[in-house]
Image (cartoon, helix red, strand yellow):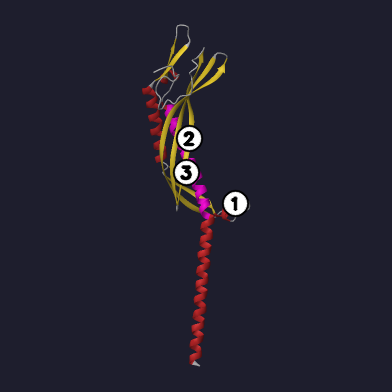
Amino acid sequence: MWGETMRQRYRRKRRQGWVFIGVVILLIAALVMLDTRLRPLIQSYGYMSARRSAMLSVHNGVQQVLADEEWGYTDLVTIERGEDGRVLSAEANVHAINRLKAAATNAVTKELSAREVQNTRIPLGNLLGGSLFTGRGPFLPVKIHTSGVVISNLTASFLDAGINQTNHRLMLEMTVMMVAALPNERVSIDLKTDFLVCETVLVGDVPDTVTQIDLGDTLRNIFGAGD
């Protein structure tokens, strides 16, 4: 009788062991499935949150710089005309352009630094799929750490403004290259935004060599009329 009781205990413990192993396997499988469904959501929400932060930083920083000081066309470009009034060249004001670029870069960098840590919430209803549960809670809080580099550039464009008229437009081009650190994920965000700084209409003939020239690296005659 005693020996049979021991065997029953042994069998019961063995069954309990297999049940425990089965529960562990099911939990591991559930966690793997949850991670597979949750990881793309975290990456997507993290990317959108970081990109939104970068856009706000760029717009706030640049608008602040453009509002603090008036950047007129004649402050950045000097037009040279011939005796007949024909446009001969347009020389970039290197000092003013570098000052504008530095101010914009510093302002946007400060805005990004103020948003280095962000918090977003992911609705777990999205895991179930379907329109009924999309966007519904409970919500999973996610902390995002970002770091980025800001590059500013000034470009010129020439547009036909009518008969014998050319619209010369100066654009501030801001580029942000950012990395967002998410839980077990890293996403890269590249954002490029253009802002109109100033423009003018040039009346009369302009040289045939007029092209769009980068004012950031080629601080020479922006009409290409010579060195």
Residue located 48% across and 37% down the image? 191
- For numbered disc 1, what is the local secondary structure? loop
* Residue type, numbered disc 3: Ala
Identify the mark nearer the N-term, 2 or 3. 3
* Residue type, numbered disc 1: Thr
Closer to the camera, 71 or 93? 93
Magenta segment: 38-67
209 over 102 or under it: above or below: above
**How far is the residue under mark 2 from the one under mark 3?**
14 Å
Residue 138 x %, y %: 54, 55
Residue 193 colored magenta?
no
* Residue type, numbered disc 2: Lys
- Please tell me the numbered disc located at residue 134: 1
Identify the mark nearer the N-term, 1 or 3. 3
Instruction: Please state if 61 lies on the left or on the right of 12 as rendered.
Output: left
Residue receiving disc 2: 192
Residue 192 x %, y %: 48, 35
Residue receiving disc 3: 50
